[in-house]
Image (cartoon, rainbow, N blue to C red):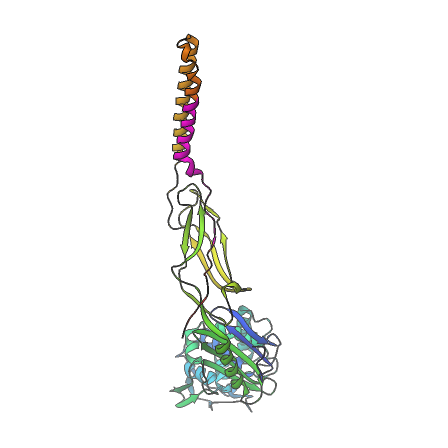
Amino acid sequence: MESLSLNSRSFFLWNNDLGLEVAGLEADTPTAVASMTKIMTALVTLENRQLDDEVMITPAMLQGLEGYAVVGLRAGQVVTVRDLLYATLLPSAGDAAQALAVDTSGSIEGFAELMNARAAEIGMEKTRFSNPVGMDEGNYSTSREIAMLVREALKNPEFVEIFNDFEEYLPSLGMMVRKTFSQIQYVTGGKTGYTEAAGRCLASVAEVEGTEYILVTVGAPLGKNVVDAQTIYDAVAVEYEPMRVVTAGEKIVQVGVAQSATQEMSFAATQDVIVALPNDTTVEDLTYSYDGVEIITPEVELGTTLGTVSVRQGENLLYEQEIVYDEAPEFYDYGWVAAGGSVSVALLLLTLGLAWRAVRQKRHKRYAWLWPVLVGVLCLVSVVANLLIFGKWFDEPGVTGVVWPEELVRELN
């Protein structure tokens, strides 16, 4: 990515499936973001209105839009929220954005307060919205934070439907509207923006080899925002490939078991995990780790979460799975050890008693030497018998650890 020749002064590329940064340039520098602002306008509207709500267009909704794209609303028209949202996100109509803002909050300023409150919830710390259209004064963000906004907006199915549409008929306006850019390879949806301060901008969502990405570019010359997006997504397609880092059903971790013939329990991955990684990635570049209970004992309750297995590429978390103890092994009953030891001691004491009695009564003096030998043999037999029967009960538990795959599997398209 570093070697790409781009026209934009800032960009940020986000792997939305994994929730990690892929690449960026001046991604945290505040800048005017033009009509990408309308993404927040649409999100706030969707969270506060119904699509079939009707809006009466007033003169206040149409003021201050000289030089900005409009859809041609007229005072006195009645338009649905749905059609105003499409007009806002497809042809980037400023009059539609202001109509939604004024009708929702009573004023531009009141709607901007809603926008900023929502930005704070998302964590957009370097962002400030002053209007729903994207006029430069007091309105700024960063390429990273606009990507954060898009990621949040994609959680709303109604937003996704509009954002991903490139052409739509608006019944309450009686017109067809189209997006401000033509669909390019990989891109599933997007929103452009332009002011002199912001340059040509584009917030887009794309699917490359099964992985969803969010890309925000800012500050390109005329037409080059789309060119840069295509260049970056092409680079992702060439430099990254889908790799299987975890396979469903395969052993992913083993945990040692104490006081049982089952010296370790194996746990399998619950799903296939295929992620886009740089082409030269090997299994040695990843870290498979387990953090949790090291030894399972009879005291561990069924249903307990033993710990977590994770797969990381550097600091990036690729996969995480909780390990749940849902089937118990058969544990040893150490009462049998005590019983066996007691019987052995009893027999030994009985033998010693008989020997002592014989010696005391001075019987069989010729064979008196046999009594110590008999006692010793019985003692040895007792020890050997107990070791054979119970010795394995005291074996060390098995080794606890994560199981690394032998290699990463490249997934063919």
User: Which residues are drawn in magenta?
Assistant: 376-401
Picture quadrant of residue 321: bottom left
Q: Is residue 407 above or below residue 154?
A: above
In the image, taking residue 117 as reference, residue 250 lies left or right, namely: left
Of the pair 60 and 85, the residue shown nearer to us: 85
Of the pair 218 and 88, the residue shown nearer to us: 218
Q: Which residue is drawn at 39% across and 31% down?
A: 385
Quarter of the picture holding the C terminus: bottom left
Q: Is residue 104 visible?
A: no
Q: How many labels sit on residues?
A: 0
Of the pair 111 and 372, the residue shown nearer to us: 372
Inspect the magenta stretch and tell me whether residue 193 lies in it: no
Q: Is residue 402 visible?
A: yes
Q: In this view, does 336 lie above or below 304?
A: above
Where in the figure is residue 135, as x and y percent of width and height? 57, 84
Where in the figure is residue 84, as x and y percent of width and height? 44, 83
User: Magenta residues: mostly which secondary structure?
Assistant: helix
Quarter of the picture holding the N terminus: bottom right
Q: Is residue 249 above or below residue 306?
A: below
Of the pair 228 and 75, the residue shown nearer to us: 228
Inspect the magenta stretch and tell me whether residue 382 lies in it: yes
Where in the figure is residue 222, as x and y percent of width and height? 56, 90
Where in the figure is residue 148, as x and y percent of width and height? 53, 72
Q: State the residue lying farthest toward the front.
A: 366
Q: Which residue is drawn at 40% across and 27% down?
A: 381
